[in-house]
Amino acid sequence: MKPLLALLLTTLIASAQQPDLFKAWDQNNDGQLSPQELPEKVRQNFDRVDTDKNGFISKAEHQAVTARNSQNRPKTPRLPENIDAKLDLPYADTENPRQRLDLYLPKAPKTTTPLPVIVFIHGGGWKGGDKASGINNLAPYLASGHYAGVSVGYRLTNEAQWPAQIHDCKAAIRWIKAHAKEYNLDPAKIAVWGTSAGGHLVSFLGTSGDVQSLEGTLGKHLDQNSQVTCVINFFGPENFLTMVRQESTVDRSTADYPEALLLGGRVQDQTAAATEASPVTHVSPGDAPFLTAHGTKDPLVPYAQGQEIDAALKKAGVDSLLITMTNGGHGFRSPELDHRVQQFLDLHLRNIPATISTEPILTEPKK
């Protein structure tokens, strides 16, 4: 969805919760909206909402857009009672709704010292997904009162190609550090956690914190760095050049598979961009510790991708844990994995010693 259309739809959806908004826009009280009556920022996508092409947006057209898009919007789950949410905070100094983050804070933190932060970055093949889903993963850890949480949105491939996505994520990390004192956060204790495409982005954050050329120039906080403390990578793509040759259910010979849409062309034809966009390319001593969980029967991102990033990190002397999810597909659930993730977070964010098992976990593909 184009940014201006998204803004128009977001505005129209919001108007459903403010019944007088349509009336306020209808300056001549004729029950329909002309382009001139709309706010300038949403006017350019007028034609997309004017479905009967009569030059006006009727109340029915307005309500149809509202209903259709309300059904498609991610539903924010109910927060635990002890968590406070500050939603849609702009991190890049823009009006783009994708360049927002949600901040979650315990109402009764267990300590008065600054809280370590768990940052979640959603998946969706870089072409879908929404930050609203992040609280599903964060809530169990935030409810303890020992952590703050952030869920980050970023531009999708229908709007922008690489490296826009990582520039957004890095800008979000810099925003968190710049606002750490305001929200009582510890800027030196930031874990990043992502699944699938989000796994790729958090892996990139973990390996490229020392690569200034990939930092981008978004936002007001360029005095901050984007380095993170540790990485939780769930089945993320790690090397586009090897993945395109590995067996999967994705046809990577076409021009419209997810990595091709990200790079603006097939990996086979964009080798320089594919190399730069692969987290393994940037592995070096001093990178953040990793916990990678990957299913042996992942049909989309082959298990070998998890093995590759683990091997590259260990070769560079970086702490890396690869947890093999036996029979796991592209997504899985496991109380044992949850326990190991908790240990990993406590170890790197709260300095609580732990011996974290890397024994394979038997699971079944997520249905």
Image (cartoon, rainbow, N blue to C red):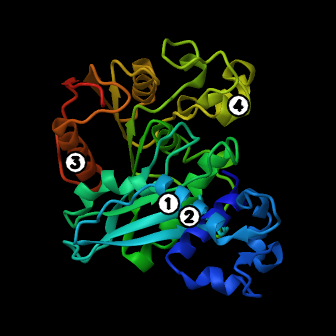
Residue 358 lies, in percent from the top left, at 22, 28
Could you say whether the residue bearing mark 4 is in a helix, strand or loop? Answer: helix
Of 358 and 366, nearer the camera is 366
Residue 223 lies, in percent from the top left, at 62, 66
Residue 39 lies, in percent from the top left, at 74, 77
Q: Are marks 2 and 4 in contact (CB under 8 Å)?
A: no
Quadrant showing the C terminus: top left
Pointer 3 or 2: first along the chain? 2
Q: Residues under labels 3 and 4: Cα distance?
A: 35 Å
Residue 316 lies, in percent from the top left, at 45, 29
Disc 2: CA contacts within 10 A as few (<14), some (14-19) or many (>=20): some
Q: Nearer the viewer, mark 2 or mark 4?
A: 2
What residue do we see at 50% from left, 63% from top?
101
Q: Are marks 3 and 2 in contact (CB under 8 Å)?
A: no
Q: Nearer the viewer, mark 3 or mark 2?
A: 2
- What amino acid is found at the position of numbered circle 2 in the picture? Thr
Residue at image mark 4: 273
Q: Residues under labels 3 and 2: Cα distance?
A: 40 Å
- What amino acid is found at the position of numbered circle 3 in the picture? Gln
Q: Which mark is residue 66?
A: 2
Pointer 3 or 4: first along the chain? 4
Q: Which mark is residue 342?
A: 3
What residue do we see at 70% from left, 79% from top?
31
Q: Residues under labels 2 and 4: Cα distance?
A: 39 Å
Q: Which mark is residue 245?
A: none
Residue 19 relative to residue 234: left or right: right
Q: Is residue 4 above or below residue 347?
A: below
Residue 147 relative to residue 41: left or right: left
Pointer 3 or 1: first along the chain? 1
Q: Nearer the viewer, mark 4 or mark 1?
A: 1
Of 133 and 226, nearer the camera is 133
